[in-house]
Image: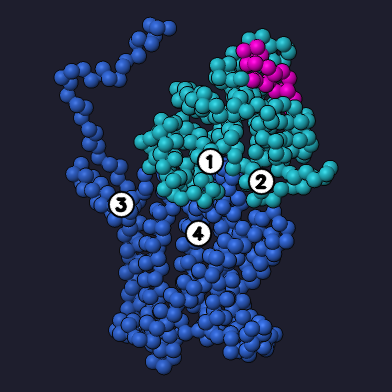
Chain colours: A cyan, B blue
Amino acid sequence: MTAMVKAEGVHKSYGAAHILKGIDLEVAPREVFCLIGPSGSGKSTFLRCINHLEKINAGRLYVDGDLVGYRQKGDKLYELKDSEVAAQRRDIGMVFQRFNLFPHMTAIENVMEAPVMVKGESKAVARERAIRLLDRVGLGDKGGNYPSQLSGGQQQRVAIARALAMEPKLMLFDEPTSALDPELVGDVLDVMRDLAESGMTMVVVTHEMGFAREVGDSLVFMDGGVVVESGHPRDVLGNPQHDRTKAFLSKVL
Amino acid sequence: MTDKLDKVPDPADTPPAGAVPPEAIRAIPVRHYGRWISAVVVIALVVALGFAFAQGNVRWATVPEKLFEPSILEGLANTVWISVASMALGLVLGVVFAVMRLSKNPVTSTIAWFYIWFFRGTPVYVQLLIWFNLALIFPILNLGFYKDEMTQVMTPFLAALLGLGLNEGAYMAEIVRAGIQSVDEGQTEASHALGMTQTQTMRRVVLPQAMRVIVPPTGNEFINMLKTSSLVVAVQYFDLLRAAQDIAATSFAVMEMFFVASIWYLALTSIFSVGQYYLERHYARGALRSLPPTPWQKVKANLSRFSTRKAVA
């Protein structure tokens, strides 16, 4: 079975700042893969490389067996065109820390936008699915609201529904609960747990250790642009082997 | 710890049963004597100015007489037409050149830079004259499928349209660019992550949000355009000012005709200011929890505030 995400020696730098220093990892289909680590460790940057929001400088990154952002012919790499990159991203949903809902569209319009524009779906079909998805995230009655009229937790759940509307095979979560008031975190995590149970492959950058322990199948601790420790969340969180992992966990647990 | 918490009064409990509701404050407002004095001074100045105009060599009766003169109305229609057409051209060029300017393609961004540099850097009056006299450089216009004398092609209308429109395009490009750059980068990322292309992202996500920033200065630009269009007299276009001047030249009612023109310019700008207000309201949707009141709602609110003040005093 091909790995859903496969990273081989991935490097990323912004000018002189070397953010990722050789990441190797594999995410199996239907797996919930958690990335933890201190801020600046490169975990969000790595996540953004998976759907080519960031270009990697070295190494190879595959999603479902396809090279991300490039085409390989012989030993030469060719950059993909804008439209080809867009086509690759259709199958990869992403949820952002700051929601990034489109503020000029209502919740339901947010969810309908990509299927209509990208897949050329009819509005009726898109609307029907949007209603179903909003219902699934517990916001069936909020479809007509603009994002500014929703709480952070509600906005994030709309954002999850928006990503699911493209029926992705992989979902990326970039600290989805970090911008939320503590009492709103639970609703978002519930939706994510439900999604994990349905068999979605998920890569989750998170500070929610409880979620990682309960829902995660694999966990990676990153620091300074490298993978320090990986394994089953129960093992890494319960019995960390490296000093850096121990130091980090002692601060957050 | 729990003791402390227990002492915090529960707001639901505070007004004990049977208590009278608190009395609303009815205070005497602060007196603004400075406002009264300055109002009196201003009124005195206005009266003095009005007196001077009344005494001057102006036949006031001419103004309403000529206000609806057919040639004036024709000039007025032409002024509106050239302003709207030039503004439309400027808007299209503005969006195109703003997007080009922000493009990663160095050829398109350089072209846009030069366009803005030239058309913003030279007076619009000069640009109008250049278009009008283009026949001096290209005596014959040859587009392959179409060939004619340039003097035939470059009518006053076309010279006015190109002169005003291309100049406006340069200003609009900068306004649109500022609007595009004001949209949060997360919006572009979210759109890209959904699989939308650069073009779709620009059209569906970025530009609609940029409109909030673009509309107010664009309204200013249009009001400017209504007035700047009076420069088209230089290319023989028959606009409102030209119509007024023609009558002034034969009837010697010089000042009177300028007043006629001014009244119409003021009427136009006033109408479009109201339109601009409602346009801004439209693009504020989603950005504000509740839309701002319309002018009529504001007037009503102010009137009711005034009457409560009187009641207090």
Q: What separation in Å lies between label 3 and label 1 (alpha carbons)?
A: 45 Å
Q: The numbered mark 3 sits on a residue in which chain? A: B
- Give the CA separation, mark 1 to mark 4: 38 Å
Q: Pick the residue in front: B193 or B57.
A: B193
Magenta highlight on residue B117: no
Total numbered badges shown on the rendered structure: 4
Image mark 4: chain? B
Q: Nearer the viewer, mark 1 or mark 4?
A: 1
Q: Helix, strand, or loop for circle 4?
A: helix
Q: Is residue B153 above or below residue B52?
A: below
Report if residue A220 lies within the magenta region. yes
Which residue is the site of mark 4? B217
Q: Which residue is mark 1?
A: A166
Read off the residue under disc 3.
Answer: B298
| Residue type at tag 2 | Val
Secondary structure beneath dot 1 equals: loop
Residue range of the region highlighted in magenta in the rendering? A218-237
| Residue name at image x 41 percent, y 39 percent | A131
Image point 27% across, 49% down: which residue?
B301
Q: Is residue A70 visible?
A: yes
Residue B240 in view = no
At label 3, which amino acid type do we have?
Answer: Lys
Q: Which mark is residue A85?
A: 2
Which amino acid type is marked by label 4?
A: Pro
> Foreground: A75 or B224?
A75
Q: Main secondary structure of the magenta part?
A: strand
